Amino acid sequence: MRGHHVRILVTAAVLAGMVVAVPAASAATIGSPTDPNVKYFGRWNTSSSTAYVSEWAGAYVVVGFTGTTVKLKQRRAIDFFVSIDGRPDVSYVNRSGTVDLTPTKLAAGRHTLRVSYRPIAGSYKGDAVFQGVALDAGAQTFVPPVPEKIIEFVGDSITVGQRSSKQALTAYGWLTGEKLRAGHTQIAVGGACLHPAADGCLSMREGFLRTGLALNAPAWNFSRYKANAVVINLGTNDVGHSVTKDQFRSSYVTLLRRAREKYPTAAIFAMGTFRKRYLPETQAAVKTLNDGGDSNVYFVNTEGWINEATDTVDNVHPNDQGHRKIADRLAPIVGAKL
C-alpha cells in the first residue's frame, strides 16, 4: 500500500534473521515523506507531499536506512521520541529544523529508525509534522520488516497516555501492541466523549471517521490500512457533559457498527471504564451487536485491573505502573482473537 499505514516493526531479534528487499527509490524521494520505504502508523494527513501531519496520539513513522548517520527534518518546534535499531526511545524536547539523531555515528550498515511525536492537545501546541530524513551521501532507505496484524485503540486521555511519563509510548495501547508484536495506533484525545454532547465535547463516535481532531477534518480513508482488532475505551468523560444513559448506549451501538463497517473482519473490544461509568450501557451496546449476528464484538470487564490509589496519578489517569498492569491484562484478551 505504497508506504502508508502499515504494521509495526518487529523486534531487533527478529530483524536480525530476516532478509528485506530494497525497493527502488528515486534520488528525489529518498528519505522524503513520499519515499515508499517510509512506513506510517496511524492516521496521517498526506495532502502535502513535503509535510505529513499527525494529529491523533500514537501515530509514528518507521524507515530503514543505510549509512552511519540520520537526521530528522522538522518544520517548527515539537517534542518527539526516537528509537534506532530497536533501542530504548530517546526524548527530544522542543526541537525544530534538521535534528541530528546520531551525534555518535552508527556502525556502517543497515539500520531502522522510529519517530513518535508528542500528541497535540490542551495547552501543548507543538508541530507534529514529518518532513523526512537526511542520510549520508549515497545512503539508501529500505522497507523495514513489519508484522501481519494491527490494533487500533479508540479513546480519551487515558488511551492517549496523558500524565504517564512518555504519554502515548507508555500508554496501555502502545504497550499492548508491543507485547503482541502487532502494529498499533491510538485514535484518542484528552477530554473526548463518546456521544456528541450539547456543550461541544469532542465526540469519538464522529472522530473515529476523521483524519484529524476537528469535526470538519477530512474524512479518513479507511483503505489505508485494515485493523485486525479495535479496542474502545470511552465513557469516562461523558458523565461530566450530561450525556444520558440512553444517549450513551445508542452512540456506542453506532460506533461499534461503524467499526464493523470499516473493518469487516476485526475483533472489536468495548472496555468497561476503570471508573465504572456506563458499564450496563456499554454491555447493552455489545449485546445489540451480538444479538444482530455479530459474534466478534466483546465486552471487556476491567474491574479490579488497577488501584486508583497506587496506579493512577489523580484517581483517573493511570501512571506508568497502571498502564503496564492494564496492558498485562488486556494483551492476552486481544491476542486470543488475533
Image: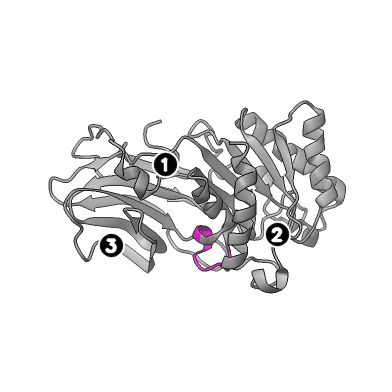
The residue depicted at 56 percent of the width and 45 percent of the height is 217
| Placement of the C terminus among the 4 image quadrants | top right
Q: Find residue 146 and report its image quarter.
A: top left
Marks 1 and 2, how far apart in space?
Answer: 38 Å
Q: Which residues are magenta?
A: 162-169
Q: Can residue 208 be seen at all in this image of the molecule?
A: no
Label ID, residue 77:
none
For the residue marked with disc 2, what is the amino acid?
Answer: Trp
Callout count: 3
Q: Nearer the viewer, mark 1 or mark 2?
A: 2
Residue on which disc 1 sits: 46
Marks 3 and 2, how far apart in space?
Answer: 40 Å
For the residue marked with disc 3, what is the amino acid?
Answer: Val
Q: Foreground residue, 227 or 107?
A: 107
The residue depicted at 80 percent of the width and 40 percent of the height is 285
If you read the primary sequence from the N terminus, does the residue marked by circle 1 or circle 2 appear first? Answer: 1
- Density class for disc 2 (Cα within 10 Å; few <14, some 14-19, many ≥20) is some
- Density class for disc 3 (Cα within 10 Å; few <14, some 14-19, many ≥20) is some
| Placement of the N terminus among the 4 image quadrants | top left
Residue on which disc 3 sits: 99
If you read the primary sequence from the N terminus, does the residue marked by circle 3 or circle 2 appear first? Answer: 3
On screen, 37 above or below 223? below
Residue on which disc 2 sits: 305
> Is there CB contact under 8 Å for labels 1 and 2?
no
- Picture coordinates of residue 132 (x, y %)? 30, 49
Q: Foreground residue, 281 or 98?
A: 281
Answer whether residue 166 is magenta in the image.
yes
For the residue marked with disc 1, what is the amino acid?
Answer: Thr
Judge left or right: residue 230 versus residue 129: right
